[in-house]
Image (cartoon, rainbow, N blue to C red):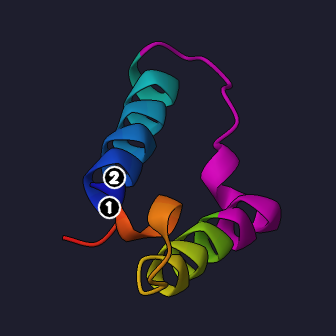
């Protein structure tokens, strides 16, 4: 779900800037956003394998 959301956001910003002559900054080109996505994915990957109640809900 993350990849389609990121791609749709990126393409929509590009199209809005190109066709409507806007100057909207793309937050995906910020290094803090990249690190936040990386940390979120890694935490999900680790926590879904923990066998305690709140985290066991994340496992399929």
- Asked where in the image residue 35 lies, by quadrant, the reply is bottom right
Image: 47 above or below 12: below
Q: Identify which residue, 54 or 13, lies in the foreground.
A: 54
For image coordinates 28% across by 72% down, the residue present is 59
Give the mark toward the camera: 2 or 1.
Answer: 1
- 55 in magenta: no
- Label 2 vs label 1: CA separation? 6 Å
Question: Where does label 2 land, which residue?
Answer: 7
Region rendered in magenta: 20-36
Say if mark 2 contacts mark 1, CB within 8 Å: yes
Q: Residues within 10 Å of mark 1 (few under 14, many from 20)?
A: few
**Residue located beneath label 1 in the image:** 3
Residue occupying image coordinates x 67% and y 59%: 29
* Label 2 packing within 10 angstroms: few (<14), some (14-19), many (20+): few
Disc 2 secondary structure class: helix
Quadrant in the picture for the N terminus = bottom left
């Amino acid at each position: 779900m993350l990849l389609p959301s990121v791609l749709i956001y990126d393409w929509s910003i590009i199209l809005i800037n190109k066709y409507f002559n806007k100057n909207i900054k793309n937050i995906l080109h910020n290094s803090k956003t990249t690190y936040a996505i990386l940390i979120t994915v890694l935490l999900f990957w680790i926590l879904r394998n923990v066998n305690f109640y709140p985290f066991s809900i994340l496992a399929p």
